[in-house]
Amino acid sequence: MAPSIVQDHYPESFAHCYGCGRQNDLGLHLRSAWEGDEVVARFAPRPEHVSLPGFVYGGLLASLIDCHAMATAAAHVERVAGREVGDAEAPRYVTAALHVDFLRPTPLGDDLVLRARVVETGRRKVVVRMTVTAGGEETARGEVVAVPMPESMGRAS
């Protein structure tokens, strides 16, 4: 059985994110799922995702890291609570801090693989570390602090 995709379980009213929202027709539609003890996503950059011919735009990498970290936080919190992704609506997290290290230029043409793990869980935050690889080469690393979505953002629905 295929692992459950975190973003498929975001509440309908909060599934509009450019990076991962299934309700955003123009978005990236990132899809994250457990693979063992990591949350993994794969993304195929399109020709318009370039910085220079042949290389992926760094802002895209930061967006993917951001969205994948939020999905990882949601999946982790569900697992800690004794639930799996899909047992209920996935909790929504937002970014409190985002740090990206660009290790080498990311070539356009290879699928990107994002692998994430939670390294710290607190009452009000989840810290996620991840890598981005292209063609088997690590091209970027990220560390993201995720916090539960504030109630004030819920009024947007």
Image (cartoon, helix red, strand yellow):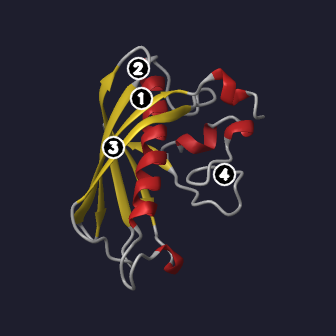
Q: Secondary structure at mark 1?
A: helix
Work out whether mark 3 precedes mark 4 in sequence or the reverse, and give the earlier one: 4
Where is residue 8? Give x, y as percent: 62, 44
Q: Which mark is residue 80?
A: 2
Evaluate if marks 1 and 4 touch, with contact meaning CB atoms under 8 Å apart. Answer: no
Q: Nearer the viewer, mark 2 or mark 3?
A: 3
Q: Secondary structure at mark 3?
A: strand
Amino acid type, callout 2: Val
Separation of marks 2 and 1 at Cα, in angstroms: 6 Å
Amino acid type, callout 3: Ala
Pick the residue in front: 87 or 12.
12
**Which quadrant of the figure has residue 127?**
top left
Separation of marks 3 and 1 at Cα, in angstroms: 10 Å
Where is residue 111? Give x, y as percent: 39, 69
Provide the residue designation for mark 3.
116
- Binning the other alpha carbons within 10 Å of mark 1 as few (below 14), some (14 to 19) or many (20 upward) gives many
Amino acid type, callout 1: His
Provide the residue designation for mark 4.
22
Work out whether mark 3 precedes mark 1 in sequence or the reverse, and give the earlier one: 1
**Which quadrant of the figure has residue 143?**
top left
Provide the residue designation for mark 1.
76
